[in-house]
Image (spheres, rainbow, N blue to C red):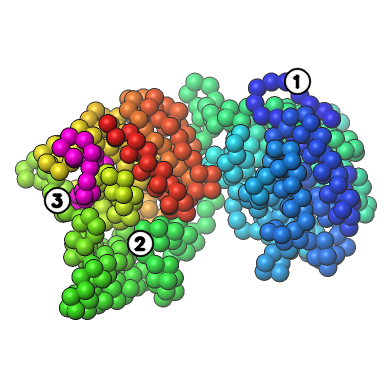
Amino acid sequence: MTSTSPGGGVIVAVAQLALAVGAPDANRKAAADAVAEAAAAGARLVVLPELCDSGYVFADADEARGLASRAQDGATLREWRSLAATHDLVIAGGFCELGDDGKLYNSAAIVDGSGTRAVYRKAHLWDAEKNVFTPGDGAPPVVELPFGRVGLMICYDLEFPEWVRLPALSGADLIAAPVNWPAAVVPTPPGERPDVVVKAQAAASVNGVFVAVADRCADERGVSWVSGSVIVSPRGFPLAGPVLADRPVVLTAACDLPQARDKRVGAVNDLLADRRPELYARLRPSGSRVAAASAHWGARFVANGTDIGDFQATLGRIRGWDDWCREWGVTARRYEALAEEASAAGRLVTAGEAWRRAALCWHWGKFVFVDHPDEQRAAHDRAVSCFRRGAGTLSPPAELVSVPYGGEGGALAAYLRVPGAGTGAGGRPPVVIMIPGLDSVKEELQATAEYLLRRGLAAIAVDGPGQGEAEYDLPIEPAYEKVATAVVDYLAGRPDVDGDRIGVFGVSLGGYYAARCAAFEPRLRAAVDLAGPYRLDSDWDSLPPQTRAAFQVRSRAGSDEEARSRAGALTLEEAAARITSPLLVVHGGQDRLIPVYHAERLSREAPGAELLLYGDGNHGLTNHAFDSRSRIADWLATHLAT
């Protein structure tokens, strides 16, 4: 064993193994022995090589198929789970996978004592691998472990800077890389390291993450190996290795994984915040706007009240973006007809539910459909009207209220819902101001409001400037604390809520607004920022085209360039340090709209902040809706209890 000197952080091990194709039992035993050796050295994470159960140099696809196993019930992952439980550690390693679709994949898994935490299929196949395996198309996973966040990719994947950037943006502290690095055809110059080792060091340095590479040794059917197992620091320097010798060995190093979350380089620079995505646009294919909308928002539609069947049926009718609003209107009209029929028969609960479902469908049709303003406005009006007809049958009902705003008789529309019983002065419940994002509205937030109401909290969801009922009259307002102040003033005059116990919740761009409100409206007792940006223009060109177009329209910008400039005004750079009241920053590690570094920066700079991160969470955590909304509601109930 080779190890670094003792130091702070978790012990990470990489196991360089002598593997043989077609000898899975011997290969698994070598891996088990290495895991035990690493555990004896105190390792909490052990990285094993690529295809470490099957070997690598297959005669053909049939030989590989005979050595492959399924992820859910294969011998390799079962054994890793047992080893992880026995030694109280986590294993990341490569295996030959037979997919449920019958295809072969060069895969890797992260496994702990509870089972398989993630499976990743190699996306970039090397050389003859293309004759055996199907490439994966899923992004590298990032798994939240007790000691840090671990991303996973395989061998040749490391050589694609765009691919390594994805787990870095998703909050990975360390990238585990099982590899089988074949020896270079062209010899490495004297005194230099092999190019694959240099690339691993570069990947660590340019992303500010640890990289742990487990290579292999022992010639296999005429192929020799770099045997370059190495553990690299976020600065790109080796902490252990590279071995560069044809022998089995276990390397260990103490890695202070949270160190990777600080991307600052000197006093004024930051590896991620200094990126200029607007200059990298040619790296992003244009793709289909319909496909992009489905990928980004499908889980959101379902989590907020639209049946998966309606979602699939509607998208099945859409052939191009111009069909989007019209086809959601077709689905909406079906619910309108159901509502009218139920209402005529006196079935008011059914009618109310159908009206609200119709409203959501109209909303999905218009929410980023800015290409055809007249069609969008008509869908907007129908969404507002349908929800109003169904608001009274919610339990508790949603009361449409007007919040004075902006002087000269101006007002913002909001829905206030008050639970039947509260605590505090006169039995009045605390109240949470709910803020939509760029393309969400007060009606959509009612699915989340249910979690607050069940905990005895009142909820007032408001359409602020650039949102919902206000989007056609008022442009986006970066200083959203003006809205919070207006709502707090309004609530002070309500006899049915406790105006001294007010919190604020916002999602997506509304998360930015919530944090901004917490900085400048002192009467707010607690705030939740879910999936909000720290600075909106930081990843402008990585945003979906529909999102950029919607911001351009709702900010009254005349061009994409002007919209980017206006997005730069939505920043917490001066506000974060002012947030001294409790702030819960909630984010998904796989958020493709607002990368996780936004949340990490805010939680680092705001004195009152705590960070709740779901490593595999999407934008808005709609793939963890129950858990995340429950935890948010519990947190708010606790902080507004007295």
Mark sitting earlier along the chain (1/3): 1
Q: Position of residue 296 (x, y in %)?
A: 45, 56
**Quarter the C terminus occupies:** top left
Above or below residue 17? Residue 607 is: above
Which residue is depicted at the point 39% across and 67% down? 307
Q: Can residue 199 be seen in this snapshot?
A: no
CA gap, disc 2 and disc 1: 55 Å
Residue 491 place in picture, x, y as percent? 16, 40
Query: Residue 5 got which mark?
Result: 1
Q: Compare residues 175 and 477 and report the one nearer the observer.
A: 175
Q: Nearer the viewer, residue 612 or 278?
A: 612
The magenta segment: 415-434
In the picture of the structure, the residue carrying the numbered disc 3 is 401
Q: Residue placed at 59% from the left, 36% from the top?
A: 146
Work out which quarter of the rendered image holds the N terminus and state it.
top right
Residue 248 in view of the camera: yes
Q: Which residue is drawn at 37% across and 51% down?
A: 548
Name which quarter of the figure residue 320 lies in: bottom left
Secondary structure of residue under mark 3 = strand
Residue 433 in the magenta stretch? The answer is yes
- Tell me the kind of residue under disc 1: Ser
Residue 57 counted in the magenta span: no
| Residue 554 or residue 68, whichever sits in front | 68
**Residue 55 in picture, x, y percent from top left:** 84, 53
The earlier-in-sequence mark between 2 and 1 is: 1
